Amino acid sequence: MTSLDPTQTDAWAALVRHRDALAGTQIRSLFESDPDRFTRFSHTQGGLTVDLSKQRVTVETVSLLLDLAAAMNVEDRRAQMFAGETINITENRAALHVALRDSSGRSYMADGVDVAPGIAATRDRIAEFAQSVIDGSCTGHTGQSFDRVVNIGIGGSDLGPRCVVTALGTHCGIHADFVATVDGNALNDVLSVADPARTLFIVCSKSFSTQETKTNADAAKRWLTGVLGADAVAAHFVAVSANPDEAAAFGIPQDNVFPMWDWVGGRYSLWSAIGLAVAVGCGQDAFDRLLTGAHAMDQHFESAPLDQNLPVLAGLINVWNRNFWDCPVLVVQPYDHRLRLLPMHLQQLVMESNGKGVTGSSDAVSHAVAPVVFGGSGSESQHSFMQLIHQSPMVVPVEFIVSLNGQNDPNRDKIFANTLAQSEALMNGLPAEEISQESGENLAAHKSCPGNRPSSTILLDSLSPETLGALLVFYEHRTFVEGTLWGLNSFDQWGVELGKHLASGLLSDIAAGHARAGQDSSTAGLLAAYLAQ
Ligand code: F6P
């Protein structure tokens, strides 16, 4: 991949000049001078309205950012992704997750092979299996139907499906649990309330070599066979993996293994059989509708001109905040209890994709890359970290997500009012002069808020499988756009490997009962404390 340095483009230089010209501008004053600002900077697609009007942007800003998109070949890169070209150059792979959401019959080529038939066949298997678990025709070793599914996986083999199941809820009579951490307490918590005869385990691991997942799967197998005997494994374990041999070595029959493909990155894999827990927990219909909404956003991203393209515009604005206004953090605030795990999913998506130190052509990056993403349920965050966002000198852009139709929430007016209050407060602030001086008090400096803090608001028509699919894909493509603007390969994650490697060395040290010669005194001292207990 030859990758341009965005900072060397004319568009970048123009944006620097433009930033300087805008430095004294208050966002609220942009509303005063343009009564149509909300309409101008809001875009609706697939049940989502993305309001970018409270960002520090003008028509000229967007135009200059679009010049940057042109300079960094966003359109070509988009076409390469949909064409199945080897855009994940360090792993020599395509990144073809868009194919997983398309049931139109279109061909998607990876390495000269059409992957669409394999995807369609797997979707049929998922549907058939999920239905049989839900209707009770698929039973456990003792002939009883399942009442619980336990997804064992980590990273992309956990966060996506966990986020979706939490958002959509389980309504088919099968309780869904997720176990990711290697800390055995998590699995024990689940097993302590599970009935072995009625529990189905889905072991999700693209590689089938991940320590956490293998450890938990082994422990679950011991728990199950301890009660039901060794023969029970085949009826209670299925796997999703691109490494069926390892799944077989674990004892899962070939017929119970759902395929994964190397052209699907872990954090983009929810749409494959990694979403099996969604199909079983929320129902196959919900899973299908999730994919339908996801595909609609793919179509929009693939075909809409860049100046009307939601993931492109939102990605450009994130780069504007990150690189031109030096905002190192992005807060995501779902004002919807059901979306409370979305920030965790986005942390992996954004930071594992674009938290890189070199460009696609192996040069050190000369600019900031992905922000630190964090967030949580909006209502609760107001009473914890939002203090810093309102008053600390560091400017942190915020992204609010809220549904127009709160469905069963009796307090939806309060949720909606609080969402808008936060974005208004961030933008308008509170000048010290407007604070009344009560007798004996002189707290104006403490109570005032600087304002002029950018935010976006994403309105969902309602939280449905379709809008959730569209929302998650909006984020995937926005991340890809940002990575392209930064000249990165957004589809590898080499940085996580070093810690994995060191952990296995330290496990050997623990087994040996002593630190290795040459270990730093901190690591050796901490290890000695552990070994001394
Ligand atoms: O360690 C990071 C990572 O490779 C993620 O990218 C991935 O989602 C996760 O581990 C789990 O990997 P696997 O599905 O192969 O177990």
Image: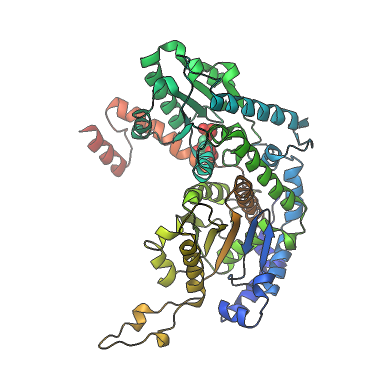
> In x, y percent, where is residue 79?
76, 48
Q: Residue at x 37, y 21 (%)?
A: 223
Is 100 above or below relative to 403? above
41 or 167: nearer the viewer: 167
- Of all residues, the one furthest to the left in this rendering is 533
Does residue 271 appear in this view? no
> In x, y percent, where is residue 166?
49, 43
Is 406 above or below relative to 531? below
Q: Which residue is drawn at 56% across and 79% down?
A: 28
Is 369 above or below relative to 183? below
Numbered circles on residues, count:
0
> In x, y percent, where is residue 424?
51, 73
Question: In the drawing, does residue 304 fall left or right of residue 397?
Answer: right
453 or 507: nearer the viewer: 453
Does residue 374 appear in this view? yes
Say which quarter of the image contains residue 133.
Answer: top right
> In x, y percent, where is residue 200?
48, 24
Quadrant placement of the C terminus: top left
Q: Residue at x 79, y 35 (%)?
A: 105
245 or 286: nearer the viewer: 286
The colouring scheme, among rainbow, by chain, secondary structure or one colour, is: rainbow
Say which quarter of the image contains residue 24.
Answer: bottom right
Question: In the drawing, does residue 354 fall left or right of residue 304?
Answer: left
Is 91 above or below relative to 221? below
